[in-house]
Amino acid sequence: MGTLTLLPNRKRCVELMTLQMQKKESLCCFFIDLNGFKQINDTIGYQGGDEVLKIIAKRVSHSISGSDIFARLGGDEFILILCDYGSPSHIDIIVERG
């Protein structure tokens, strides 16, 4: 777990994803790179940028199910892995909800 966002880090994400793949469940991955994040740090400082990362982590974490994986890969890069989501039409619902 990362100390800033309390999200799994890259290494833990790989471990969790490997476990899910062994279950032979459907997986859908979203790579999220926050565009313009440098400008946030430049405008409100690194401490403010850290607060933005915490808010994002909390909001996304609360909008996914317990079996899904949301991890911070580093900096302003995240990955969201939806596990056993049913059908592709469910992905649209999840994305719209987020």
Image (cartoon, rainbow, N blue to C red):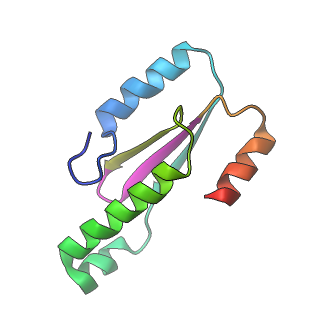
The residue at 60%/58% (across/down) is: 98
Residue 80 screen position, x and y as percent: 51, 45
Left or right, residue 3 beside residue 63: left
Q: Which residues are magenta?
A: 74-82
Q: Is residue 84 above or below residue 42?
A: above
Q: Is residue 64 above or below residue 23?
A: below
The residue at 69%/59% (across/down) is: 96
> Of 43 and 51, which appears nearest the observer?
51
Q: Is residue 38 above or below residue 16?
A: below
The quadrant the N terminus occupies is top left
Q: Main secondary structure of the magenta part?
A: strand
Residue 32 screen position, x and y as percent: 48, 55
- State which quadrant residue 7 falls in: top left
Q: Is residue 25 above or below residue 64?
A: above
Left or right, residue 38 beside residue 21: left
The residue at 57%/14% (across/down) is: 23
The residue at 29%/47% (across/down) is: 6
Magenta span has 96?
A: no
Residue 16 screen position, x and y as percent: 42, 26
Left or right, residue 73 beside residue 59: left
Total numbered circles: 0
Magenta span has 79?
A: yes
> Of 67 and 18, which appears nearest the observer?
67
Left or right, residue 3 beside residue 94: left
- State which quadrant residue 12 falls in: top left
Residue 76 screen position, x and y as percent: 35, 60
